[in-house]
Image (spheres, rainbow, N blue to C red):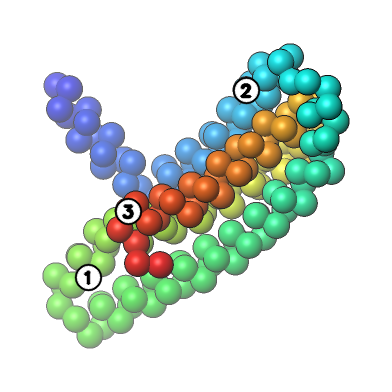
Amino acid sequence: MLKHWFVFLRRISQKLWVRGALFALLSVLTLPLAIFVEQFLPPEIADRFDKEAVMPVLEILASSMLTVSTFSLGIMVSAHRSAAAQATPRVHRILIRDTTTQTVIATFIGAFVYSLSAIILFRAGLYGIGAPVVVMGVTVLIVVLMTVWPCCAGSRI
């Protein structure tokens, strides 16, 4: 029974939309984390990182990841079209199962979704005073993840 759950979780984790949704969930989970961390932050750190310091970083991340994701998806669709038109069905199945490409694209889309979700939460006024520090920390973590995760997945980028 447990083995079936692992197989199910592995299959669903390979879906592109699940990976993007996890990044969105990360931005939403930043809200309670920020509320918890806020009480332990020294005032000088909370004063140094305010909403105006974090928003430009999130906006740059959102716009650049939208561009990179669109470009990457276009390349992937072009490769699939070429394989479908000129190669055997086996080559097309191999392309569909290419986890490296899916991981890279999911990371780009996930970073876009994270930054967009964080921007929306800031604009809605849901984050508190200490939230910019936590959001900046999570954003740096996302940037590191975007750099390391595709490399660990065997990417040749």
**Is the residue 22 above or below the residue 59 in the image?**
above
Identify the residue at image location x=40%, y=55%. 150
Which residue is tagged 3?
A: 153
What is the quadrant of the N terminus in the image? top left
- Residue 133 versus residue 79: which sits nearer the camera? 133
The label on residue 19 is none
Identify the residue at image location x=40%, y=67%. 157
Q: Is residue 141 visible?
A: yes
Q: Position of residue 144 (x, y in %)?
A: 52, 48
Quote the CA–CA distance across marks 3 and 1.
20 Å
Image side of residue 21 versus residue 67, left or right: left
Q: Position of residue 5 (x, y in %)?
A: 22, 28
Identify the residue at image location x=74%, y=20%. 41
**Is the residue 115 above or below the residue 76 in the image?**
above
Q: Amino acid at mark 2?
A: Leu
Quote the CA–CA distance across marks 3 and 2.
29 Å
Identify the residue at image location x=39%, y=72%. 77
Instruction: Give the structural element (helix, strand or loop) at label 3.
Output: loop
Which residue is tagged 2?
A: 33
Instruction: Give the structural element (helix, strand or loop) at label 2.
Output: helix
Quote the CA–CA distance across marks 1 and 2.
43 Å
Which residue is tagged 1?
A: 92
Instruction: Give the structural element (helix, strand or loop) at label 1.
Output: helix
Q: Amino acid at mark 3?
A: Ala
Q: Amino acid at mark 1?
A: His
Q: Is residue 110 visible?
A: no
Q: Are marks 3 and 1 in contact (CB under 8 Å)?
A: no
Q: Position of residue 138 (x, y in %)?
A: 60, 37
